[in-house]
Image: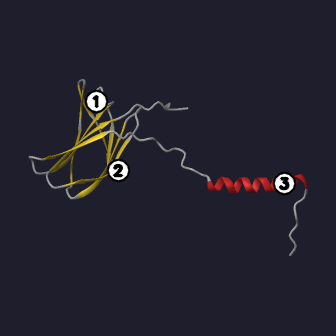
Amino acid sequence: MKIKILKGVRGYIYLVFILFTISMCSTIKEVNREPLSTKYEIKRLKSKSGSSKIIVNSYSDDKYKDKITTVVTINNICFLNRHIGDSILPIKTKVIHSKKYEVGVFSVGFLSLKIKDLYVNKRDSIVINAYLKENNRPIYD
């Protein structure tokens, strides 16, 4: 079996195209990676009722202490803040103790927050104060 050596301009174009394709395959990166907010505070309190709870308060920044409407995911189950008049209530949910949880806090116009491996003991009331930073990226292009 003979291998033909590519000659001329057409051969160089094929060679450059093949090398370009190989180099692009090795440099593919995750494009839509969202930046994360890193400011949060976790308080562990003992529950008077005997059940374990996770309570999430969401603020626009740690300087202003303005509460914002957020969607909170706890192990991929979504919860939304409730409003009574002008006040925004925190998200409260009962959870099973002796288990690890992953908590995410999301809001439009703010960086999201993810807390992995949050371990809840028996009779724990976990209070999470999430301080979300503003996201300067446009919502749509």
User: Which mark is in front, 1 or 2?
Assistant: 1
Tag 2 secondary structure: loop
Few, some or many residues within 10 Å of mark 3 (<14, 14–19, 20+): few
**Residue 92: x percent and y percent?**
22, 42
**Residue shown at 27% from the left, 56% from the top:** 100
| Residue 11 percent across, percent down from the top left | 86, 56
Q: Position of residue 69 (x, y in %)?
A: 32, 32
Quarter residue 23 falls in: bottom right
Please name the residue that numbered disc 3 is placed on.
Answer: 12
Q: Residue furthest bottom?
A: 1
- Give the Cα separation between the discs numbered 2 and 3: 52 Å
Q: Amino acid at mark 1?
A: Lys
Q: Quadrant of the C terminus?
A: top right
Looking at the image, is mark 3 or mark 1 earlier in the sequence? 3
Q: Which residue is mark 1?
A: 67
Give whichever of discs 2 and 3 has the lower sequence position: 3
Q: Secondary structure at mark 3?
A: helix
Mark 3 or 1: in front is 3
Q: Which sits in the foreground, 69 or 42? A: 42
98 lies left or right of 106: left
Give the quarter of the image for residue 38. Answer: top left
Query: Please, what is the three-letter code of the amino acid marked with disc 2?
Result: Asn
| Residue highlighted by disc 2 | 76
